[in-house]
Amino acid sequence: MRPYKPYVEFRLTESRIRLKTPEGENRIIEISPGSSFGAEHPTTRLCIMGLEEIFKNGILKKVLDFGCGSGVLGVCAASLGAESVLAVDIDPIAVKEAEVNFEKNNLSSIGRVQYGSLEDVRGRFELIIANIVTDDLLTMVDGFKSMLEREGILLVSGIYEMKKEALVTAYAKTGFRVNNEYSESGWVAIWFDTK
């Protein structure tokens, strides 16, 4: 297996992200300054759009934020109603920053952060979020499928528009179907359902 490399994003100031809850209320989450990925990039915004829509359709209790970076997507899922969020990253700096961000948003009782790769994750989830590079998403499709509950949801991003079709084709072969897509500035996020 080839080694995976952390992707960094330097944040010099706190990020404040507005969420629309399933009840239609506005909620602000705060992400501390740091170097781990995930607060300002278009793929993060696309995933947040997807999460808002997913949770509007029903609360998913058990969530995995894989390749969590700053923990922003796990924090969003917890803020939108998830009862349990496991955030996982291969970068020890990201793990520490994600812990800080769950605590900063008073969500430490919901979010647990773990250092490791997909092989280190145990359990099954109703929702898996993975905002990582396309090539890594392509190698992890079977792992994601095995960790999802029977009617689970997979929200992925980090996908260049030009690589979207290859990813959709690969995921369809493993039993995923596209529910929705979100795009911005040449980037794509995809909401997959299991067939």
Image (tube, grey):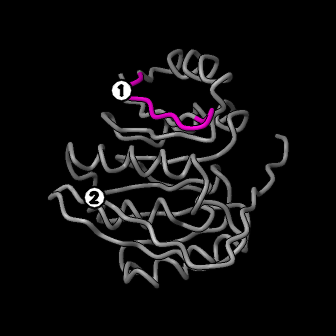
Q: Between residues 134 and 24, which one lies in front from this camera angle?
A: 24
Q: Could you say where residue 86 lies in the image, as x and y percent from the top left?
A: 47, 63
In the rendered structure, find residue 20 and report the number of the disc placed on it.
Answer: 2
Q: Residue furthest front?
A: 185
Tell me which residue sits at (47%, 43%) in the image.
147
| Other residues around mark 2 within 10 Å, as few (<14) / some (14–19) / many (≥20) | some
In the rendered structure, does residue 181 fall within the stretch colored magenta? yes
Q: Residue furthest right?
A: 2
Q: Quadrant of the N terminus?
A: top right
Q: Earlier in the sequence, mark 1 or mark 2?
A: 2
**With 111 as the anchor, is 115 left or right in this view?**
right
Q: Quadrant of the C terminus?
A: top left
- The secondary structure that most of the magenta stretch takes on is strand
Location of mark 1 (residue): 179
Q: Could you say where residue 160 lies in the image, as x and y percent from the top left?
A: 66, 31
Q: Amino acid at mark 1?
A: Asn
Q: Amino acid at mark 2?
A: Lys
Kind of element beneath mark 2: strand
Tell me which residue sits at (68%, 34%) in the image.
134
